Image (spheres, rainbow, N blue to C red):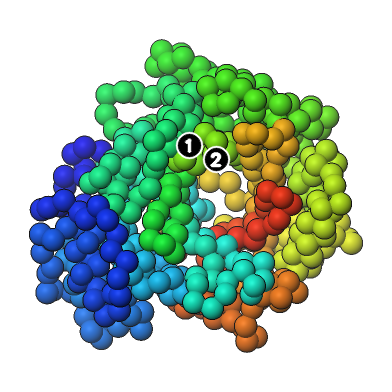
Amino acid sequence: METLVHDARFFTQMTSKPSAEWDRGDFDGRVLKIVSSVLGLGFKFNPSTIIDDSEQTGLVVYDELTKLLPPRSPHSIFFWKKVAKPFASMLQSAKFPFNAQVSFLTYMYARLLGIMGPLDERGSGSLMTFDGSPVELSWVIPKSTKSCPGGTASRQLRFAIEPIDPRSGLPLKGAAVLKYLTSPVGGLGLVRCEEGGLDWSMSTDRFLSFHSKQDDTDTGNRFFIGFDFSPSGSILLKTYYLPRPRSPLVDSTRNIKRPLIGLWDVNYSSLRTLLAALDPNLTKSLNVLCSYIDGLAFDSKPRLQILSVDCTRKETNRLKLYCRPTRGNSWSDAERAFTLGGRLDSPEMKLVVTRLKRLWDLLFPFADSQSNRDLDEVSNTDLELDCNEKNSHRHPDHPSGGLLYYYSLLPGTHTLLPKIYLPVSRYCQNDLIIAQAVEKFEASEGYGGEPGWLPKEVSAAYNHRNLAEKRGIHTYVTFALKKNYGWELTMYFSPEVWES
């Protein structure tokens, strides 16, 4: 990581310290000033452009930055077009303040394009998305129009990246990436990480780490890093750790100690070692989850896939356990897993489940809650047919079907907060149908605009193909129980960067 960040092909090199304070003045039409406040007063703008005027997108901030920011290399040009452009469209659709849009796109250009992996076939590809795109973007649509009064951003924006060295194609170590992005030079005054904010991430990394310490690449565990963008102009980080698959032969030949927990494990008892380092009181929440798992048949047990924490202090943090069963993809399976077999029960929870059921029926009418059909039994299409078979950037181990869940363990409470990931890219016919279904759900909750507003916004951001052509832009639609029995719907997207 240390040599990578000094490679001018992938990272903007600072000539002076970035501004420590984010100027909150009126920046309308003053992009130069905002960029300088992020990259430093000594940053040299290049008159050459990444795209010519004939390729203007209509995205005011993106087009202006394209003219001003130097094209460092073919690598930066490629990912600026493929990733920054849809992100710019999402920022504009969500009505983020102008200065926040400029700052966030500048940060992506300066610090994130360089960790999106190589353009060629080096490495094994990214596990971030099924099509191999190293980034997955998302937005959280509010429950109603009352959630976003006039003049404020209309939704939350996030994305996650699997950091990959563009020179070797190998995954970068999470600890090295975090250390850089939370430093003054790596964070550019936008990343907010308070004292103690990395404690849980470092504890999780140590719990899972059995890789070589000789370089900055990680060939065992996989690591994703998430970015949560606030309309106020700050960025909060989230970390995601995929354990190593258990492989006794490899472990013995490399003389590496077996991990305490492995990818796809169904026995979570060893997590108590991690909880002792994070917050021993979380063990009570884990016991609730384990009591549910113990009562399931083996193929129905949720297999552990990801451990995730936020980069914040202990009191406001959470440990998220991502898991997916081997089988069981009907509505009754989803309801059972979401409520932990009735262990998470209350009048408020019943109302949340009613909304989830409505969303399920809109997305999967061929396997609705009344028929209770399993998605795998009635789906007559194959995701493999929707993807370019010649795409060498796809990682062969990325799961393509089945329901995905996570359970949040929070300090100060013995309950868990569930979230279900509905794999629309696997089971729905195309991206247009997915967007239309979510729009119908939002309309039933009192949110939305003119008919067709949501497909229009998705199509504007991901306009490299027609939404009705196939599925793959939408990766998941998720539904989560929040504190105080609120709920949250999130749409996840792949930019399909390897599409021609």
Given residues 124 and 451, the one toward you in this image is: 451
The answer to which of 283 and 166 lies nearer the viewer is: 283
- Which residue is depicted at the point 78% across and 56% down? 352
Q: Position of residue 129 (x, y in %)?
A: 49, 53
Cβ–Cβ below 8 Å for labels 1 and 2? Answer: yes
What numbered label is drawn on residue 313? 1
Is 323 located above or below residue 432 in the figure? above
Callout 2: 10 Å neighbours few (<14), some, many (20+)? few
Toward which corner of the image does residue 25 lie, by quadrant?
A: bottom left
Give the quarter of the figure containing the N terminus.
top left
Left or right relative to 25: residue 279: right
Q: Establish if 322 lies above or below 295.
A: below
Left or right of residue 498: residue 380: right
- Left or right: 188 with respect to 49? right
Kind of residue at badge 2: Thr
- In front: 210, or 182? 182
Q: Position of residue 46 (x, y in %)?
A: 12, 69
What element does badge 1 sit on? loop
Which residue bears the numbered disc 2? 316
Q: Which residue is located at x 85 percent, y 47 percent?
A: 346
The secondary structure type at the circle numbered 2 is helix
Does 213 appear above or below 106?
Answer: above
